[in-house]
Amino acid sequence: MFVEAPARLHFGVLDLRGDLGRRFGGIGAAIPAPSLLLEARAADGLKAEGPDAARALEFARRFARHHGLDLRLHFCLHRSIPTHAGLGSGTQLALAVARASAELSGLPTDVTALAHAVDRGRRSGVGTWTFAYGGFVLEGGRTPGGRGSARRVAPLLARLPFPDTWRAVVAVPQGKPGLAGDDEAAAFARLPSPDARDVERVAHLVLMQLLPALAEADLAGFGAALGEIQRITGGWFAPAQGGVFAPGETGELVERLRAWGAVGVGQSSWGPAVYGIVGDAGASQALAQRVRAAVGTGGLVYEGGFSVGGARVWREAGAVSG
């Protein structure tokens, strides 16, 4: 059994206040590179090899405990997404392990059930929904309590494809890794509540500029809305990360991408990954070349279109699903 999962870009959180009964919410997109490629085979025990093998094994153990299974599989990671870079490596790996385990164990493969089994989606549902469907996703946040609320992934409110010609250049510079796990939870707990007007402004931008611009293939409008959302929400996270964007090379790359002609520019999640969106392959390749020169041999640069679907799942004999 093989599972290939695209990385995800996290474009921003919608609401850290929760005045209307839901908190967080988010927007993001799936990109085909970088991606992970996981292979799973029947074995005499539970084993894992390759990059991120230890994390894969821990997710497999969570899945087994959740279902009360004696899971005997050998996982091999042929390719992985850079860890703690803001590209959703943990969620994509967890869901890939869960999907392969469910397929080989004859269990349901609904993505929300998979996320629950491996304890993902406790704050953001963006990575879960990009794993399922690809494209651009908007999720509606979490309720802070109530029966069963801790088990539910934030609901998917909208999923839109990107125009075929749009391209993203994604750079992961060397430097401090983004926050994750307990450190991320602690940072969220320390963040001050944002101004209500800023929260309202972000919602207005998403509903009345970002989504319509994407639906109409208006790159300028999409980029303008995304840039303003990044400016506002980056300010919310500035006390934890040291600025609207992570300081150092991450923040410098954001400014360079903008100066070099990218229309939609920002930082994915806590970084250090940054992205720039352009309208065609020629502009994307030229931009990627400049970014590679800027980040040097220690950085990573990816260039290409947006994912048209979520994770791909297949057996050696043929495809299971797209």
Image (cartoon, rainbow, N blue to C red):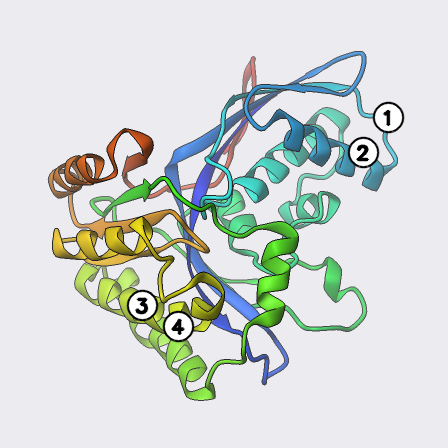
Q: Position of residue 76 (x, y in %)?
A: 60, 18
Q: Residue 235: which numbered mark, if any?
A: 4
2 or 3: tag closer to the N-terminus: 2
3 or 1: tag closer to the N-terminus: 1
Q: Position of residue 58 (x, y in %)?
A: 72, 33
The answer to whether the residue labelled 2 contacts the one labelled 4, judged by CB atoms less than 8 Å apart, is: no
Q: Report whether 296 appears left or right of 83.
A: left
Q: Residue 64: which numbered mark, if any?
A: 2
Please report the residue visible at 58 percent of the width from the left and 63 percent of the height from the top: 187
Compared with residue 19, is residue 255 higher up or lower down, i.e. above or below? above
4 or 1: tag closer to the N-terminus: 1
2 or 1: tag closer to the N-terminus: 2
Q: Which of 55/216 is in front? A: 55
Alpha carbon separation for disc pair 2 and 3: 40 Å
Q: Which residue is mark 3?
A: 210
Q: How many other residues sit within 10 Å of disc 1, few (<14), some (14-19) or many (≥20)?
A: few
Compared with residue 228, is residue 198 higher up or lower down, i.e. above or below? below
At mark 3, the secondary structure is helix
Q: Position of residue 178 (x, y in %)?
A: 48, 50
Query: Given the image, on which type of amino acid does mark 3 rest?
Result: Leu
Please report the residue visible at 75 percent of the width from the left and 13 percent of the height from the top: 43
Q: Which residue is mark 1?
A: 70
4 or 3: tag closer to the N-terminus: 3
Q: Residue 273: which numbered mark, if any?
A: none
Alpha carbon separation for disc pair 4 and 1: 47 Å
